[in-house]
Each structure stands twice: as structure tokens, then as C-alpha cells.
Image (tube, grey):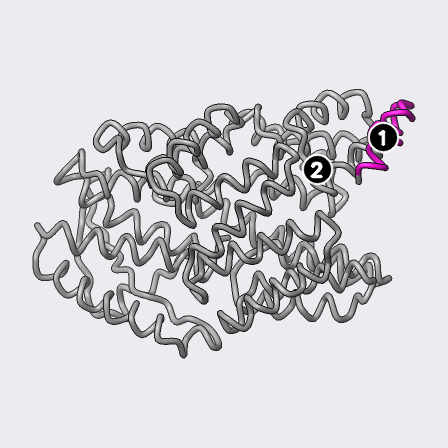
Amino acid sequence: MTIVLPVLFALAAGFVVLKYNKEGKTMPATVYLLQDRKGMAAQTGEWKEVQARFEKAITIARTNEEDIKSRLELAALFIQEARVTGNHMYYDVAAMKYVNEVLAKEPANFEGLIYQALIYLSQHHFAEGLAIAEKARVTNPDNAFIYGILTDANVELGNYKKAIAEADKMVSIRPDIRSYSRISYLREIHGDIPGAIEAMELAVDAGAPGDESTEWCRVQLGRLFEYEGDLQKAEECYNNSIQNRKQYGYAFAGLGRLAANKKEYDKAIGYYMQADTLVKDYVFREEMVDLYEESGHADKAKAIVQSLLDEMNKETKASTADENLGHYADRELALLYVKAGDLDKALEHALLEYKRRPKNIDVNETIAWVYYKRREGEKAVKYLEEALKTGSKNPNLLHKAELIYAMVGNNEKAKGYAKKG
């Protein structure tokens, strides 16, 4: 979910404007353009439509500094492209440029506030995103989508009861793919997998086949079937998703998981490699690390870990240097440092993430795992129990619970989680 900020686009566009920074020195204002999509994604009618919308909006924005509508359109296009391509570091900044221009002119602009909140969530600034979303709710309390943002922000901050209330409000206003998918996730993390499947099926049915949001939901449905042990239905979901949206990276990753489950490591790695060429998401290479280790290729696993750490640390430095970026990735870095065997660094990053959102179950799971790896079982249990508080049946969490309880000698609980997993 990252990548490099392309500084050359302003020059390529032949459109460079000077602005003043905080010190009063002139500097070029970057102009953000669409980046080329890869593979089949570049051949679709959807991509041609996006390009046409962009050209129309950028033309108006360049010639009319007061036009709000074109800037909102550019922000919406960039936010969507971030989701489609995974290139959040570039597109989040691009979108925020136009959002800030809108809000400078109209501080209470509802769409502008919604987009700003979405970008903050994308950058993992969850508390800031929640604050902006609350401000937007005051402006338009009957809009369903704002409750989706409020749901997401509260989930990430670990305010699960509040998230449920916001999702219920959302679905009562507009039962659609967005609200059903959020209901599904809340049911999932509370251990209701059949209920999560039911809601995600409604989400898929409510979406248009081939749309990125629909196929994302179809892939999530496949993952839920994996939890239930119905691997045939899971495979059907992934294959249908690939058929509906050619070369959909997350569907290939789903097939990779299924192949890994059968210990078909070469096949699984192939699927993840294919996914990695289609969408910019570190998770694909992280999964390959485990597959290489399990198949006896520790050298390849180590090389991938190091390359991921190099890239993520480079982007973290860029985020620190540029006030427009600021993407937090400490949980991801903590897990990578565990794989690298640097447990001091892993703990450092895990605690940084915990400081921001101490009630989130995924963050607590991460710290518990770091302490387990450090052979500090009693500390691990403290955070594990917080991670288990919603009753999640995520197999990875249950496996970690089994190992941690066994480490501290609580064999009864260890066996209980072994059965659940």
C-alpha cells in the first residue's frame, strides 16, 4: 500500500507553478497526473472512462482556480485509483492536494470533508480521520456513506460497539454493497462467520460484476469460506472474480492461499508473484516469505524480507520529510522485523502502533506475537487476551493463542484454541 512519490510528473506535464513554502521560498507545485495501469487493467473500458473524466476535470481545474466541482472530481478519481492500483503513496497525496484546495474555499464542503477523512484513513491516521468524519456528519447527518467512514475509523481505533452502531445506522439509511460489507466484517471479527458470509453475499449481489468494489467483496467472501473450511466455494469465488475483472490481484492471492493449504508451494508462489505484478500491496510478498521458508528456501525468504524493509523504511523517511504524506506503517514494520529476526525493532514499532490505537484487536495480536517471539509469555498473554476480546475466529489468531498459552503452561486453554483453529 505504498510506493514512490513521482517527482517528475510536473515536468512531464509541462505545467509547473511556483508556490511559497513555510519559509517563504519559492518551490514548484507538483501537478499530479494519472499513472498508467498495468496489464489488462490498462485495456478496459473502465480505464478509458477514468482517463476521459480526468482530462475533462484537469482542464477545468487548470483554467478556473475557483472551480470546486472539478477539484472534487479529481480527488474522487485519485482516491479510486489508489484503491484499484494500490499506489496509495502517490494518489493519496494527489487527492489531498485538491481536497485542501476545496476546503480552503469552502471549509464545510461535505464531499471535501468526506474525501479528507478517507485519505486520513488510507494513511492510517485513524484518529484524525474520525475527527473529520464527525465534522462531516454535522454537515449532513442523513448521508449513508459518512457512517461507513465512521464505522471504519472506529473499528481501526478499537471502538467496536460504536462501530456497530454506526454500521447499523448506515444500513438503515442505505442497504447496499458498502453497508453490507461493513456489517459482514463486524460479524466476522465477533466470531459470527455464517452471519458474515450471509452479509457478504448480499454485498456481492448488490454490486455490479467486474467493479473493483464488487470483486473485492467477492474475494472477502472467498476468504470467509476458507474460514468455514469450504475450499471449493472459496475457489469458485476467486475464479469468478478473475473472470469478472481480468487479472484481479487479490483473487490470485486467494488462489495462492488455497494452493499453500495443499502444500503446493511452487504453485502458490506463482499466484502471489502474479498478484504482486498487478497491485501494489506488500502483503503478497510477505506471504511469499512464509512459503519460501516452508519449502526450504530460507535464502529467498530472507532476501524478500530485506527488500520489503528497505522499501518501507525508505517510504517512512519520505513520509517524515513531506508533511503531505505521513503514512503510518508501524504494525506492518513490526511484523516484518519479526520475520527478519530483529525483535527489538519489532517491539519498537509494535509499541508505536499500540500508542496510537491500544484497543484495536489486530494491534494487540501483533504485540502479543512479538512478545511470544521474544520468549516473554506472560507479557504476550496480556495483549493476546485483548486481541481475543471480540471472539474472532481468525485461524491465525487462534493458532497464536494456542502457542502463547502453551508457552506459559496453560495447556487447557492451548488445547481449547487448537480445537477452535
Q: Where is residue 161 in the image (x, y as percent from the top left)?
A: 51, 24
Circle 2: element type: loop
Between 171 and 321, the one nearer to me in the picture? 171
Q: Where is residue 410 in the image (x, y as percent from the top left)?
A: 89, 23
Res. 4 mark: none
Q: In this view, does 366 lie to the left or right of 123?
A: right
Give the labeled residue for mark 2.
Answer: 393
As shown in the figure, which amino acid type bears the numbered disc 2?
Lys
Q: How crowded is mark 1: few (under 14 residues within 10 Å), some or many (20 or more)?
A: some
| Among numbered discs 1 and 2, the one appearing first in the sequence | 2
As shown in the figure, which amino acid type bears the numbered disc 1?
Gly
Q: Give the range drawn in magenta.
A: 404-420
Residue at the (38%, 61%) spot, across then down: 6
Between 246 and 33, the one nearer to me in the picture? 246
Q: Quadrant of residue 412?
A: top right
Circle 1: element type: helix
Tally of numbered tags? 2
Tell me the CA gap for discs 1 and 2.
12 Å
Res. 416 mark: 1
Between 325 and 358, the one nearer to me in the picture? 358
Quadrant where the image shows the C terminus: top right
Residue 142 higher or lower than 222, as above or below? above
Residue at the (16%, 39%) spot, across then down: 104
Whether residue 4 is visible: no
Q: In this view, does 138 lie to the left or right of 302?
A: left
Q: In this view, does 65 lie to the left or right of 397?
A: left
